[in-house]
Image: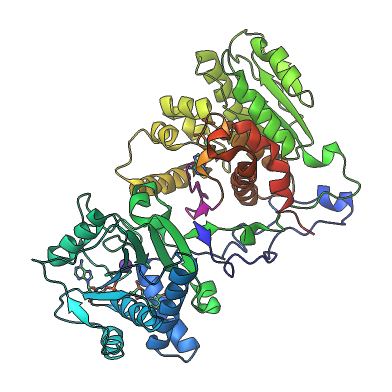
């Protein structure tokens, strides 16, 4: 995904805690959750298809323009992208395939633009009984030298492998799975081996709900959408349809976007910049909290080391890591900045330390699932009075012993990947949409924060609002990346001036960003979890208040 330069412009998000320059007394007397949680996370709302249509209409009214004007903006943006980014050359065969609605109208205007600019455009129309008014208007604007041919189901257009297909069949108006000529054309496009650029949506894909498994859906190389992403773009099951998605600005009304209520956000750097309080000049290690991490078992001490190092790099004041006896030397040598509390058991953690000193507690990386460790988790859940970050085997223990889930303190942060989440809720998800429903039900039931890790890690707040993370890369799909995330989140939960939501959002963003910053040094293949640790500092620095 690449964001448009204008969409990616940086401003300080409002609503972040303003603490720089304040006396320490003022900081330490702050409540634990100082900021209004969702305030300022509004740059990229995920609208439903119906809300997108309403936004379209509201923009037209607010800006005193016609729907054709808006369509022209969309078509100009798509045309510019094709010329500037895809670098079309004059010899490339460009097939623009148009449906009967406004998505097809966009296609007609793009075809007209490209034809006028001298490109080799062929225009194909899906047979339809009715067309939208804007489609008909665009059709009337076509120059005579650009014939629009109706698709013949018995003789689908020949699409050479080197051709470019602009898919403007259906966008947000799709109301049912494709059938008949539309489905045949989509399958034909998918088999052609051409470069496929979808306008707004890959045709056949619903914006915010699943379609039947065998539906015909365009498999686009690129999807050019307008201003805001769609939920469908963020879910793994749609990756093969959406391809590389891009957002093109078309001047949709910011005031209307601001006033549109949503329960899903795509969180950008712009939302978070300035939300991490700057370290005051006279701060000391006590200012940033003392974290306790319970991690590691024989053979999995690396997880404890990585989480400890990440917590340190994320600015925690102090960290104490509880490890099995076998891990004592390992941890002391590999993380000399951390304090280490060795358990009396050799290979697993069997005792919960005294919790009084700690501002936040993390449990899980490399933990193992020994019965003693389960008992430690049980005690932790019943005695802890500070924020908890729960990961890996601690989640698996919660899944294997669901009665423990009732003990989860509100506002705990759980960090499963999809398989751990499945164990946690005890039921496989039917699809990615169902998994989001399960996630919402889980946080509603437990009053916790819970993420599901992946390319666009999603965080659910206890009220069910979903926040999709925008940073990270496939190089991070490597053992230990999740342990790094746990340590990073633990440091931010130990920070007394961050709300649980801000800590989670900043941590997820910084984790992916650290992976992105590591990339030029390692490449995707060579990226290791320890490289993510190395770049946590610079990633957090980008989010710090002035
Ligand atoms: N909201 C926005 O930001 C903008 C939207 N525009 C375009 O407008 C599109 C939405 O236009 P529409 O609402 O006209 O919707 P579409 O063009 O996506 O499709 C609607 C038409 O397709 C028919 N249809 C729906 N499902 C079908 C199926 N399975 N088989 C056969 N026919 C089916 C409907 O009856 C209707 O005629 C967007 O995707 C975008 O491309 C742009 O023109 C301007 C900006
Ligand atoms: N393709 C990807 N794009 C972006 N981030 C990714 C990708 N794959 C994995 N990650 C991130 O890496 C981490 C992997 O965590 P996890 O599966 O728990 O790994 P481990 O258990 O090995 O530590 C998660 O934070 C996830 O979001
Ligand atoms: K389309």
Q: Is residue 410 above or below residue 252?
A: above
Asked whether the viewer can see residue 503, the reply is yes
Q: Quadrant of residue 76?
A: bottom left
Q: From the viewer's perspective, tell me whether residue 479 is left or right of residue 490.
A: left
Of all residues, the one furthest to the right in this rendering is 282
Q: Which of the two residues, 462 or 284, is positioned nearer the viewer here? A: 284
Asked whether the viewer can see residue 342, the reply is no
Of all residues, the one furthest to the front in this rendering is 91
Q: From the viewer's perspective, tell me whether residue 316 is left or right of residue 126.
A: right
Q: Which of the two residues, 263 or 270, is positioned nearer the viewer here? A: 270
Say if the magenta span includes residue 464.
yes
Residue segment shown in magenta:
453-470
- Residue located at (44% from left, 59% from top): 245
Q: Is residue 536 above or below residue 136?
A: above
- Residue located at (56% from left, 50% from top): 471
- Residue located at (44% from left, 28% from top): 403
Of all residues, the one furthest to the left in this rendering is 154
- Residue located at (38% from left, 86% from top): 67
Q: Position of residue 87 (x, y in %)?
A: 46, 66
Q: From the viewer's perspective, tell me whether residue 353 is left or right of residue 61.
A: right
Q: Where's the C terminus, which quadrant?
A: bottom right
Q: How many marks?
A: 0
Q: Which of the two residues, 372 or 106, is positioned nearer the viewer here? A: 106
Q: From the viewer's perspective, tell me whether residue 269 is left or right of residue 199.
A: right
Q: Position of residue 263 (x, y in %)?
A: 47, 60
Query: Which secondary structure class fits the magenta region best?
Result: loop
């Amino acid at each position: 995904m690449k964001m448009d330069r204008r969409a990616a412009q940086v401003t300080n998000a409002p609503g972040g805690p303003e603490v720089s320059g304040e006396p320490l007394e003022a900081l330490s007397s702050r409540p634990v959750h100082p900021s209004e949680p969702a305030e300022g996370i509004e740059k990229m709302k995920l609208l439903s298809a119906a809300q997108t249509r309403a936004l379209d209409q509201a923009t037209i009214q607010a800006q005193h323009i016609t729907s054709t004007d808006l369509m022209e903006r969309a078509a100009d943006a798509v045309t510019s992208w094709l010329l500037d980014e895809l670098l079309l050359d004059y010899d490339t065969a460009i097939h623009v395939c148009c449906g009967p609605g406004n998505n097809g109208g966009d296609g007609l205007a793009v075809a007209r633009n490209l034809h006028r600019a001298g490109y080799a455009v062929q225009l194909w129309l899906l047979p339809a009984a009715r067309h939208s008014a804007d489609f008909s208007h665009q059709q009337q604007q076509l120059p005579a030298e650009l014939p629009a041919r109706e698709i013949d189901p018995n003789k689908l257009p020949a699409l050479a492998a080197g051709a470019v297909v602009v898919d403007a069949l259906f966008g947000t108006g799709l109301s049912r799975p494709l059938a008949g000529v539309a489905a045949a054309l989509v399958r034909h496009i998918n088999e052609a081996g051409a470069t496929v650029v979808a306008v707004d949506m890959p045709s056949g894909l619903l914006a915010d709900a699943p379609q039947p498994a065998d539906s015909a859906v365009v498999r686009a190389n690129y999807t050019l959408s307008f201003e805001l992403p769609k939920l469908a773009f963020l879910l793994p099951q749609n990756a093969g349809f959406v391809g590389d998605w891009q957002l093109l600005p078309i001047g949709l009304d910011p005031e209307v976007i601001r006033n549109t209520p949503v329960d899903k956000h795509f969180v950008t750097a712009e939302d978070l910049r300035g939300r991490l309080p700057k370290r005051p000049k006279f701060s000391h290690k006590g200012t940033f909290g003392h974290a306790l991490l319970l991690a590691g078992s024989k053979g999995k001490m690396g997880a404890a080391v990585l989480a400890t190092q990440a917590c340190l790099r994320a600015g925690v004041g102090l960290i104490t890591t509880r490890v099995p006896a076998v891990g004592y030397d390992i941890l002391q040598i590999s993380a000399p900045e951390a304090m280490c509390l060795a358990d009396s058991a050799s290979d697993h953690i069997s005792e919960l330390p005294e919790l009084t000193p700690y501002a936040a507690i993390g449990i899980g990386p490399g933990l193992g699932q020994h019965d003693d460790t389960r008992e430690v988790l049980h005690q932790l859940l019943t005695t802890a009075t500070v924020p908890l970050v729960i990961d890996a085997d601690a989640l698996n223990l919660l899944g294997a012993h669901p009665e423990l889930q009732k003990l989860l303190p509100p506002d705990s942060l759980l960090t499963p990947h999809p398989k751990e989440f499945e164990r946690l809720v005890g039921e496989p998800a039917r699809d990615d949409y169902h998994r989001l429903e399960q996630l919402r039900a889980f946080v509603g039931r437990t009053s916790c924060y819970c993420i599901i890790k992946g390319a666009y890690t999603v965080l659910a707040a206890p009220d069910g609002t979903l926040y999709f993370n925008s940073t990270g890369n496939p190089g991070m799909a490597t053992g230990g990346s999740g342990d790094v995330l746990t340590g990073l989140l633990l440091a931010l939960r130990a920070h007394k001036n961050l709300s649980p939501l801000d800590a989670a959002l900043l941590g997820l963003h910084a984790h992916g960003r650290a992976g992105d910053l590591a990339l030029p040094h390692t490449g995707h293949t060579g990226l290791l979890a320890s490289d993510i640790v190395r770049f946590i500092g610079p990633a957090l620095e980008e989010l710090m208040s002035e």
